[in-house]
Amino acid sequence: MDLDLGEDQQAIRDAVGGFLEKEVTPERVRDAEPGGFDAEVWRGLVDLGVAGMGLAESRGGMDGGLLDLALIAEPIGAHLTPAPFVETATVLRLLERVDAGAALADRFAETLASDASVATLALRPARSGTFRLVPAGAVADLVVGLDGDDLVALDAAPPGVGSVPSNLGAAPVSDRDANAGERTVLESGDAARTAFTAALDDWRVLTAGWLSGLADRALAIGVEYATSREQFGVPIGSFQAVSHRLADVSTEVEGARLLYREAAWSADEGLPRMGVLAGAAYLFASETAQKSAEESLHFHGGYGFTLEYDIQLFFRRAKTVALALDAQTPLLHDLAGRILQGSGRDLIGVGGG
Amino acid sequence: MDFNTGERGELFRREVREFFAEHLTDEVRQRVRETGTVHDWKLHRALGEKGWLAASWPVEYGGQEREASEMAAFYEEAALAGAPFDGLLTTLIIANTIRHVGSDEQKREIIPPILRGEVLVALGYSEPGSGSDVASVRMRAVRDGDEWVIDGEKVFTTLAHESQYVILLTRTDPEVSKHAGLTMFLVPLDLPGIEIRPIHTLGGERTNSTFYAGVRVHDRWRVGEVNGGWDVMGVALTFERTVTGGKETVRLLERFVEWAREATDADGRPRLEEAPVREAIARTAIRNEVSYLLAQRANWVAASGGLPGVEGSQSRLFYTTRFQRTASELMDVIGPEAVLDHNAEGAPASGHIEHAHRHSQVGTIYGGTSEIQRGIIARRGLKLPSAR
């Protein structure tokens, strides 16, 4: 057991953190609304090398594992960064894994460097030839998704942020035509479903990292406000009715962080528990991010309800990202199914492995 | 970053699992359930013979110097097996405290029989008037030559009726501030003037009230300095915090899944196919994993030489509150039969979940209430201003 980050991991996080702190201010996040995409910020992440971190070194990437990526997703989420890091990283890992993805990965590596192109995974299979509400679908040049028995990659011009349906979290979602542009079949049949499931698990873990970052920052904003805001002659954070609820949130934020990291680590180690942990990490981070943002908003009193304060930005994105994949009930059922398929104490536990 | 518990931990885990499979019989479990005494001398001595009561101790004390991962595995397996180890926990807290702050004589006299599994020590901190505010104890100890005369009452002196000793937090100077006038004594329970009365609890466990009337204790039983009791308490609490991250909720989920696989609804369909049953399994598994990770984190901080203050409180807060919620929710999912207890024919999971619902209520109270834990997290972790 060693919960310290590796030296390289820490160095990259510091570099990304510095960039985000300087560039991705709350004003910048607001300016990107309602489309939810800031091309300059995305370009910045490309130039830092983190956008293509998951690509093989031969393609100009860093051969980063899922843990390396998730550790970056966390500060990116903390800043509510309007750039499709999680989406692109998910697809690049998929392309690196499937044989038919090699040529696409080569090409994408080039356009990523030259044009800061965007890739995304359609999280739900196509219905009637359409991928509905694709994350970063408004700006993605490459969309990968499951269409019937095929896992397909669509190289097609994105519809742009003008196509974004007005939504709670100003997420750059868009519907995408499953037959548009240049269509490559990556896998078919069981292999397609297996590859799609693996990609969804990657997305779950990266998104859990993103949401853990959001939860952590929302908590920090709440703590800061409770420390400086005075009522009845004392800081409101000295009231146990406030401080104890923040203590609960901080405990859950620590838990969410540990869980996404364990899930990512288990993926890199090739452990079969990864699927269970990915499902658990996404659900728990979703719950925690929402609770953190809600509690923090509440402790702002009337100001938390105004658009002027930043906490509403966190509140709106927490729910939006928690619902990006599916309703909560089917997510729980999916997780239960995986737990019950596992054998013995280690999967049921879930811990102890 | 590495989430592996380590090869040594896993090797030891297997050994511990086999030990409990052999020594923890249904007869023992049944006796524990009927008497509420969460201790078994035969099992305890067998642990002593294995050298496992001294598993983490230095070799000079006859210990095995096992690493943190091995100790975590030991406590996890003990909990998973449902081993009655309340006596082990309290006794080892005091053994460790004596090792750090006790006199050489105390070490010679007390530690070997403790590690052989022949002696238990009960904790005498709480009084009827002082729980969370533990430094407010009123029990008096007055010096009389080489002896001290102790008068007062302790409550929740769990296992006093099986123990050879009790550690008492007493007031030796009522004139100074409340933390400054305390002294700790290790008191043999067979001294004249001590009375033990049972208290029966909601969880089925027996604890005790203990009464001390003019009990004369030689000064050699004093632990730490006169009026230095609060410092000793600090050492003891450190060991209390680093002891274990519970696995009772894992056992709870296992029993629930077993039940769901066998139970059927009115139409003969397995309850395991019901949506609420499956959702409860998923929710519980998530909480269990987070509990496990928070405990591992506290252990890791301790193993790295730190004091897991905030981390320990977060671990304990999360685990104990989720244990309660989970037991209650699982009963809700089961339905009317869930209230049948282990004495009833056909009780779901042999009454295990119903018992957990009752038993889990104490987790958020002893060893620092949830409110105490939240206070530690808020002030030390979040740096929020204190109410005082």
Image: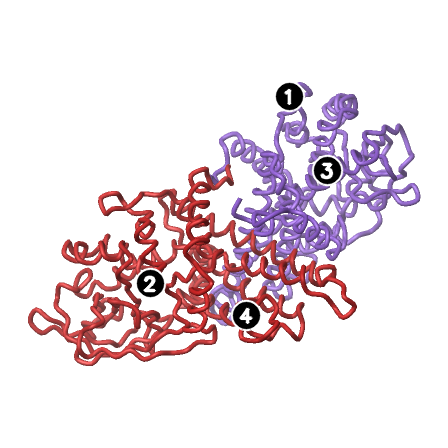
Chain colours: A purple, B red
Disc 4 marks which amino acid? Answer: His
Alpha carbon distance from label 4 to label 2:
27 Å
Residue type at mark 3? Ala
- Check disc 1 and report its element: helix, strand or loop: helix
Q: What's the chain of the residue with tag 3?
A: A
Tell me the number on the disc at residue B41.
2
Does A198 sit above or below residue B151?
above
The residue at the point 82 percent across, 51 percent down is: A166
Parent chain of label 4? B
Q: Do marks 1 and 4 both belong to one polypeptide chain?
A: no
Q: Nearer the viewer, mark 4 or mark 3?
A: 4
- Secondary structure of the residue carrying tag 3 is helix
Specify the subunit that label 1 lies on: A
Residue closest to the eye, A13 or B15: B15
Identity, as a three-letter code, of the amino acid under mark 1: Glu
For label 4, the residue is B357
- The residue that mark 3 highlights is A199
| Residue B312, quarter of the rendered image | bottom left
For the residue labelled by badge 4, is the local secondary structure a helix, a strand or a loop? helix
Residue at image mark 1: A57
